[in-house]
Amino acid sequence: MTVEISVLDKNWSNIDEVQAAGLAVAVDENLPMREYVQSLTYELRDLSTGKLVSVAPSYSISHDGLTEVLTFPESLPFGRYELTLWGNLDVATKTGSDQEGTASVTLHEDGGDEADQVYHFCGIFDYDYDRADFSAGLQRTVGCLLVDAVNLPAWIDYSEKDIEGVLGTVSKGMEYSGPVSVHTALDWGDNVSSMRTMTCLGPSASEDGTTVQISFRDSDGASGLSGVTRAWPDELVSEPVDITLRRNELTVLKYDYDVDGLHIYVLVDGEWTRVHDMVID
């Protein structure tokens, strides 16, 4: 029995509209498989006995081929088999023993870290004399929050994101559970006025069920330097925004600062919609 594995989700589902807004660039969809998925884990289960008959905990994909082919021994008897695949899986995040298989994967370690771009496939193959060659397409399990912060005070050099209401665990068959909160922090490295960040996350627990709040800060005291007139605040804390994160989709927020305050926009169907106005005293 052979299974040819391909990657279905090479680009985000809405990459065209995000690219048209100048915020991301689509990747070439004809690159070697390792450009999208760097490692693979698989488990083959005999459904007549419920037992795992072949397991690969994790191995790197290093060849230049567009697909990966799994070949199982000729001694494998005909029957019905379930193949479970995980791509880009850090085995430390998996739950379940080897005998039980990888029943579920923790997307956000410790409940608070950004998720890796984990891929998944689970399917059933009826292997017999006439059917021995099968195919499997890996799908991305996470979405991504893209934040474009523009026209900020020149000495802002640090940001923190608090994201509530994303699903932290994915089980085989793309079943999600376990709403968690995610906190990320980024040192911008210098005093700049604009910054674009991407944070991979599990999907929202419900429609408009994820809340995002961001604080932008002056971490090195540049606004308090001798001889500098303080014309801007040291910290900008945004109003909470309710959004929907979906698997394999970019959710885009723009934070634009001017003399009237911090304005927040969401990109919907290629158009910017203002969701909040925050007036700075």
Image: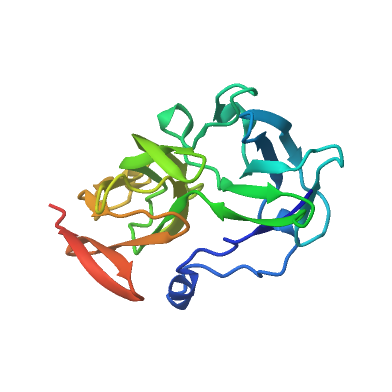
Residue at position x 35%, y 42% in the image: 166
Q: Position of residue 5 (x, y in %)?
A: 70, 55
Asked which quadrant contains residue 45, the reply is top right
Residue at position x 23%, y 52% in the image: 242
| Farthest front residue in view | 129
Chosen colour scheme: rainbow
Of 63 and 57, nearer the camera is 57
Residue at position x 49%, y 50% in the image: 190
Q: Position of residue 127 (x, y in %)?
A: 72, 48
Above-or-below relation of 44 to 11: above
Q: Is residue 38 left or right of residue 219?
A: right
Q: Position of residue 67 (x, y in %)?
A: 75, 58
Asked if residue 210 can be seen in this view, the reply is yes
Q: Position of residue 244 (x, y in %)?
A: 31, 55
Residue at position x 43%, y 42% in the image: 175
Asked which quadrant contains residue 11, the reply is bottom right
How many marks can you see?
Answer: 0
Q: Is residue 30 left or right of residue 109?
A: right
Asked if residue 40 can be seen in this view, the reply is no
Of 93 and 188, nearer the camera is 93
Q: Is residue 140 left or right of residue 80?
A: left
